[in-house]
Amino acid sequence: MTDNFAGFAASLTSPGETHYVVSPSDTADLDPRPRALKCIASGTVAVRDGAGTDVTYPVEVGDVLEFRAVRVLATGTTAVVVAWE
């Protein structure tokens, strides 16, 4: 398959190239750290940033958190999210 953009460097504003369903955990960080999270089932998502601050967001299907979360916490998360890397 031809990839006309293969010679371009990826940046935080370019589209993701891989994705995975997030398994929320109160103890394990996301690996790899994603560039964004997308909600595929509504609820709440509790995320931790690089400074260790936790915030819970209400999300609806299709919402994108343009945020590089370190961890998606099991406590407080009821939504299903996928990570974009």
Image: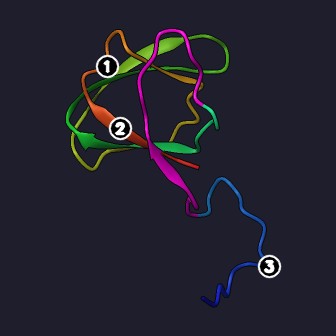
Give me the residue at 73% from left, 78% from top: 6
Q: Residues within 10 Å of mark 1 (few under 14, many from 20)?
A: some
**Magenta residues (range):** 15-30
Could you tell me which quadrant the N terminus lies in?
Answer: bottom right
| Other-residue count near label 2 (Cα within 10 Å), few / some / many at <14 / 14–19 / ≥20 | many
Question: Disc 2 designates what residue?
Answer: 81
Which amino acid, mark 2? Val
Which residue is rendered at x = 26% and y = 29% of the image?
79
Question: In the shown orientation, is residue 4 left or right of residue 46?
Answer: right
Does the magenta portion include 20?
A: yes
**Residues at marks 1 and 2 touching, judged by CB atoms closer than 8 Å:** yes
Looking at the image, residue 27 lies above or below residue 36:
above
Question: Which residue is at 47% across, 46% downward?
Answer: 20
Q: Amino acid at mark 1?
A: Thr
Query: Compared with residue 82, is residue 11 higher up or lower down, i.e. above or below?
Result: below
Question: Which comes sooner in the sequence, label 1 or label 3?
Answer: 3
Q: Is residue 81 left or right of residue 68?
A: left
**Label 3 sits on residue:** 7
Q: Based on the displayed image, in which of its 4 quarters is residue 3 positioned?
A: bottom right
At label 3, the amino acid type is Gly
| Label pair 1/3, CB-CB below 8 angstroms | no
The image shows residue 77 at horizontal and vertical percentages of: 31, 19
In the rendering, at what x and y percent does residue 81 appear?
A: 35, 38
- Asked if residue 32 lies left or right of residue 66, the reply is right
**Could you tell me residue 59's position as x and y percent?**
26, 34
Dominant secondary-structure state across the stretch colored magenta: loop
For disc 1, the marked residue is 77
Disc 1/disc 3 C-alpha distance (Å): 38 Å
